[in-house]
Amino acid sequence: VRIETLCTGDELLTGLTADTNSRLFQTLVLERLGLTVRRSTVVGDVREDLIEVMHTLAARCDAVLVSGGLGPTTDDLTAECAATAAGVPLVESAEALAHLIARFARRGLELTPNNRRQALVPQGAEVVLNQEGSAPMFVLRLGACRFFFVPGVPREYRHLVELQVLPRLAALLAQRGETPVVRVLRLLKTVGLPESHLDARIRPLLAKYPGVTFGYRTHAPENHLKLLAHGATEAEARALLAQAEAECRPLLGAHLFGVDQETLPEVVNQALRTAGQTVSTVESCTGGLVGAALTTPAGASDVYPGGAITYASALKTQLAQVPPELIAQHTVVSAQVAEAMAAGIRRALHTTFGVATTGYAGPTGGDAVNPLGTVFVAVAREGRVVSERHLFIGDRERVRAFTTHAALDLLRRTQLET
Ligand code: AMP
Ligand code: MG
């Protein structure tokens, strides 16, 4: 079965809106049915372009997903152009009109004549009501090709694609005697493992799992392992995925910090919450980025009371009890000072852990021993402080972002040991 997508809207051609609808459809149709979209076309709100492209697509496709242009305004031309391309008139759908009237009544609004336009569909089209919006979806055959016309609003689009379009495509596949291939995806997110090492660890599994595609994605400083399992049914694909994942986990060890949508701050917050532990921060070169990361997940206050930004040396002494002699002896960018900061903030704020950052983020600074990009991160807990030195390459923003990530990861690994 050959499928393509057609998106309409001037906003998609002027850089105002990214075509995320096609991307979503490509993902869903691949995951659920094992089909790859052959081409994706984008056209503006221009009658002759729309009609011409519908004719072209009708001639070469089995199915086309069209998004956009079903609204009430004058630039919404899709239904009209579809009717022209099919050589049929536009007719008012009684059920679409009833749906529109009911939706407007619920909001206490009166239907204007341009709203009424949304009930117009090409004669002979199958109308599918849209529970998430006012414009209906409709299905129309142009020659041998089925066109699915769906509103462009992403929420409505997703809803209709999942509930209405995918089942119809599955039925079309079955009718053609093609077996759908279901794919399920798992991302295993690692930190501290270069891509080449990740690949070397996982390679032995490749031959063992021909039904799983192993992929790598760098999301610096993280590396993600992508497992895509294929099966004739979702249950079969899921079972295979679970088995492959279970074999990958021990190979990745503590480098593996999360899966799928999980982020490092979420994982750290959750681990602390589960253990009933807390953390405080004292930041120099990251200027609050570690605190910002820890407060990104909702409900962070049970694990993170707060911290200090001690950019000047005097504040490291004042707020994190770092002895001035220690700074004089080792400089502020040193393991000793990072460790003293972490221990000091932990004592001052009575938390289970204390996290500290100090370093040269650039664009100037650094010395012969600790050049630009050198940072120290430290984590203190009862009776013990650990620190790590990193040398990050890149601009100030990158060094600060990587330092934040390194501090959270050291916290994660320290927490795992407790
Ligand atoms: P329309 O159905 O053409 O009235 O589109 C309604 C809204 O949906 C537009 O204003 C866009 O913001 C959004 N939209 C339309 N097409 C797309 C698309 N392909 N990807 C993402 N958003 C879209
Ligand atoms: Mg539009």
Image (cartoon, rainbow, N blue to C red):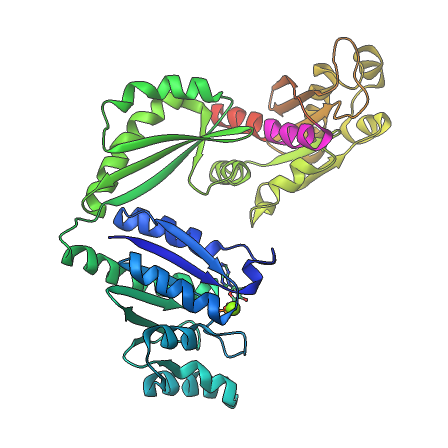
Residue 107, image x and y in percent? Answer: 50, 84
* Residue 124: in magenta span: no
Q: Is residue 263 placed above or below 129 in the rendered structure?
A: above
Relative to 157, residue 236 above or below: above
Image position of 64 (left or right of 341): left
Q: Is residue 185 above or below residue 103?
A: above
The picture quadrant where one finds residue 52 is bottom left
For residue 407, side relative to residue 275 (left or right)? right
Residue 230 location in percent, x, y?
Answer: 25, 39
Q: Nearer the viewer, residue 108 or 1?
A: 1
Residue 304 can be seen, yes or no = no
Measured along the vertical axis of the image, is residue 278 above or below residue 165? above
Residue 244 drawn at (x, y percent) = 28, 30
**In the depicted view, which residue is nearer to us: 393 or 25?**
25
Query: How many numbered dots are placed on residues in this image?
Result: 0
Q: Is residue 403 magenta?
A: yes
377 horizontally vs 72: left or right: right
| 408 sits to left or right of 104 | right
The range drawn in magenta is: 395-407
Residue furthest out toward the top: 369
Q: Main secondary structure of the magenta part?
A: helix
- Residue name at image x 39 percent, y 57 percent: 5
Q: Position of residue 208 (x, y in %)?
A: 22, 24
What residue do we see at 54% from left, 36% from top? 277
Q: Residue at x 21, y 45 (%)?
A: 235
> Which one is in front, 34 or 39?
39
In this view of the protein, can residue 119 be seen by the observer? yes
Q: Quadrant of residue 332?
A: top right
